[in-house]
Image (cartoon, rainbow, N blue to C red):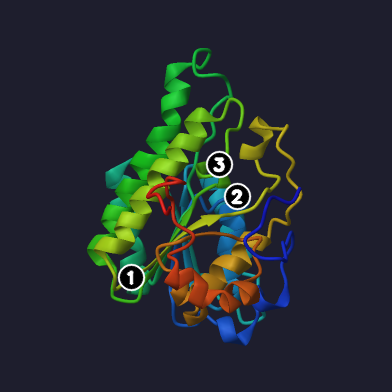
Amino acid sequence: MAHPSFTPTYHTKPYAQISASNPHLSCKGKVAFITGGGRGIGRSIARAFAIAGAKVFIIGRSEASLKDTWEELSKVNESSDPADAAYMAADACDRAAVKSALDAAMRLFGSIDILVNNAGYLDANRSIVDSDFDDYWRCYEVNVKAGIIIAQEFLHLAQPGATYINISSGAAHIPYIQNFSAYSSSKMAFARIVEFMQGENPELRVFNVQPGALKTDMQLKAPHIQADDHIDLPGGFCVWLTSSDADFLKGRFVWVNWDVDEMLKRKDDILKNDLLRLRLSGWPRED
């Protein structure tokens, strides 16, 4: 189901300009660290970076899922080397576990050039009054607390030019969705933190991304949300974001469905009018 789009073209599947096998988007010599990398969106993103030639380190809570993804990453290219991918079971809410995983990636690969914050949680979709508080608050534990932990630990080791991609959600900014208050507000809160992360670290490349409407384990909690996008769409888009073509989108909120060439055509408009940021509509007054 297509939403109102920033670009005339609204993609639901991968296309040539964001293909991970496009030589222009090569990530050879780079290292990508991906949270929630064992399945769903995280697995798609890990696969795309492996196809693009990056070394990939994935973390998540399920060692079995991580192992399955690692085995797939080891076979994505004819030249794939199992040593170019690694995984570690780690809860993104646990600072010690996150630090241990980042340290392991640094020891193994020498740097982390790209970090994708993909770990997320969706509650049981109930009204505020009917929600179980612990389930409601779990959205903030994973979508905000874990995000802050990962961001802080990454910032301690990130080198100038490194890319940080936050897998957010359109729910962070689109109008009211019934029974989505926990998920929507937690995603909005961390997306705003990511904007500050860019402001405080102008030497980095920081992005908020809506990954599409995808059939994943999380989406099963919200079957009323139509999920027709291809699972490989976010992976290719994230690879494109690491290219210099996307520099003008630093600190902004973008959807993987938007056409990258059409966004490039609007570059001057985006920069001049400071578009694609979280704002209070109608303020300041312009009359």
Q: Is residue 18 above or below residue 115?
A: below
Q: CA distance from mark 3 to mark 1?
A: 26 Å
**Residue 171 bears which disc, if any?**
3
Q: Are marks 3 and 1 in contact (CB under 8 Å)?
A: no
Residue pointed to by mark 1: 204
Residue at the disc numbered 2: 39
Within 10 Å of disc 3 (Cα), the crowding (few <14, some 14-19, many 20+) is some
Whether residue 103 is visible: no
Are circles 2 and 3 on residues that touch, CB within 8 Å?
Answer: no
Specify which label sits upstream in the sequence, 2 or 1.
Answer: 2
Residue at the (31%, 68%) spot, across then down = 107
Q: Pick out the residue farthest to the top.
A: 130
Relative image position of residue 67 (x, y in whole percent):
56, 53
Q: Within 10 Å of the Cα at label 2, are there few (<14), some (14-19), or many (20+) other Cα atoms? A: some
Q: CA distance from mark 2 to mark 1?
A: 27 Å
Kind of residue sitting beneath label 1: Leu
